Amino acid sequence: YPVEVRLHLSRTETPPVFVAIIQDITERKRTEEQLSHLAYYDTLTGLPNRALLLDRLQQAMVKADRVDRLVAVLFLDLDRFKVINDTLGHHLGDGLLKAVAERLKDCMRAGDTISRLGGDEFTVVLADVAHVDNVTRVVHKILDSFARPFRVDDRDLFTSVSIGITLYPFDVHDAEGLLKNADAAMYHAKESGRSTFRFFTADLNVRAERRLALETALRQALEKNQLSLHYQPQVDLKSGRIIGMEALARWQHPELGQVPPIEFIPVAEETGLILPIGEWALREACRQIKAWHATGFPKLQVAVNISGKQLLQKNFPEQVQAILRETGLAARYLDLELTESILMVDAGGGAAAMQALHALGVSFSMDDFGTGYSSLAYLKRFPIDVLKIDRSFVRDLTTNPNDAAIVKTIIAMAHTLGMRVIAEGVETYEQLAFLRDQGCDGSQGYYCSKPLAADDFTEL
Ligand code: C2E
Ligand code: MG
Ligand code: MG
């Protein structure tokens, strides 16, 4: 055991003697170690923390320069960890993080550093890499290792991980920059469908910055009146008359320009901004259609896109009812468009809200049909009035016999189940004629009209 030795010369004796005081300092050494451990290690998992990681990364970079090797930085983020934490509790969440740390250690060589940066984010530094293939091999090993469940408190938990990778000296030359790049690449991996990996590329930085700018700007879009609705007519294929319209959100930002919904709706959904934005769209569409009714135009129905988050709010039916009351619009003129994925996620809660609204007279459309679960039998469990065939099937309808067969079948089966069918993205007369001949009820697409601002729709 470690000791501290103090020597005193004592002249009171003859001859003088040395007095040695020997003290066991095991305790003090342990405290010192604990303090330095606290400064450099994560208390939950015992892995190096950010400070130690940066230190090791810098050492690895210096060494790599000398021996002409690469350093790879992997940024790992568990997929849907928040759900596990929120539903099973922090205790199991912490247990899972510890188990993940152990699993990662098993995938690494001795010289590699695994660290936890906080939350469910881990970083791995692979030092002394001879070839990129070695990196992808390790990454595959990590991804595969997540196929097995994690044992936490006698429970088997499953999680997957998304991994972003950056390479030194290819991408940037400082440790902080490498971490930032790997983080951006990790986001890209998440966007590409999770449980996968992506390498950093230069344009990811540009995209990450734009995303951040979008998010910041979107928070103010509503109060600054930058959002508006455009309306795209839906045409009856027998009579050729306009039978309704779909309301589509538009965002005009002074610096970012016209931001398309496929870009800002996902950001709105991730940040929860879809709730106020969706409520605004619903109110605005009802107000506008009521105004058209009041000025003597035919009583058309308006379709409004609803995100899953909106439908699953506890008071969604009440919210819709309040908006209808406020705007004086009868429920039968409102149609709500949902995508298949919404019904897959939480069939129970969503179905109840749909039934309640359907009983009031609100109708429902299944949007983008064919891109998700695509089970007509399954759909029968929900009060769906209209099936909208996704644009991707309509596009090659006249050239691809498979698409033509799919569209024919969807129309026939939907009719058997008592639903109407509207084809999306009809751009040519040939497509329109084919759909009409197959008995499709309605068409929506550029052939008839692009989505129009309210004034232009009045004109039309
Ligand atoms: P969606 O609901 O499937 O809307 C149809 C999309 O197809 C619209 O794109 C429309 O402009 C486009 N489109 C219509 N006809 C044609 C055509 O002939 N050819 C082609 N190539 N495209 C056509 P948009 O307006 O960009 O909206 C994209 C998506 O954003 C919508 O897809 C919808 O999922 C979402 N979205 C738009 N507004 C809202 C909203 O207020 N709330 C929510 N939750 N989602 C919205
Ligand atoms: Mg839609
Ligand atoms: Mg659609």
Image (cartoon, helix red, strand yellow):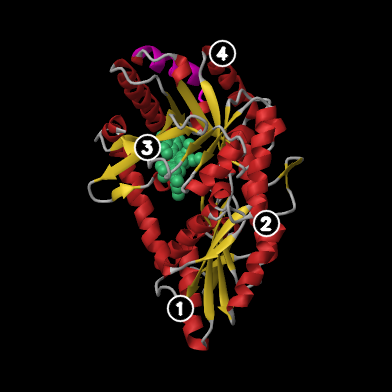
Q: Position of residue 184 (x, y in %)?
A: 45, 59
Q: Which mark is residue 169?
A: 1
- For mark 1, give the secondary structure: loop
Q: Is residue 178 left or right of residue 143?
A: left
Mark 2 belongs to which amino acid?
A: Glu
In 3D space, how far apart are the residues under numbered discs 1 and 4 (Cα atoms)?
63 Å
Check residue 352 for magenta coloring: no
Name the residue tied to disc 4.
Answer: 359
Give SS at disc 4: helix
- Span shown in magenta: 312-326
Most frequent secondary structure within the magenta stretch: helix
Whether residue 315 is in magenta: the answer is: yes
Question: Could you tell me the amino acid type at mark 4?
Answer: Ala
**What is the CA distance from the residue labelled 3 to the residue labelled 2?**
47 Å
Residue where numbered disc 2 is placed: 102
Report how far apart the C-alphas of labels 2 and 4 lie in the structure. Answer: 53 Å
Quadrant of image for the N terminus: bottom right
For disc 3, the neighbor class at 10 Å (few under 14, some 14 to 19, many from 20) is: many
Identify the secondary structure beneath mark 3.
strand
Residue 441 or residue 99, whichever sits in front: 441
Of the four image quadrants, the one with ligand 1 is top left
Mark 2 or mark 1: which comes first in sequence? 2
Residue that numbered label 3 is attached to: 249
Count of residue discs = 4
Residue at horizontal 56 percent and vertical 13 percent from the top = 359
Q: Is residue 325 above or below residue 111?
A: above
Observer-side mark, 3 or 1, equals 3
Q: Is residue 90 visible?
A: no
Dot in front, 2 or 1: 1
N-terminal of the two: label 1 or label 4?
1
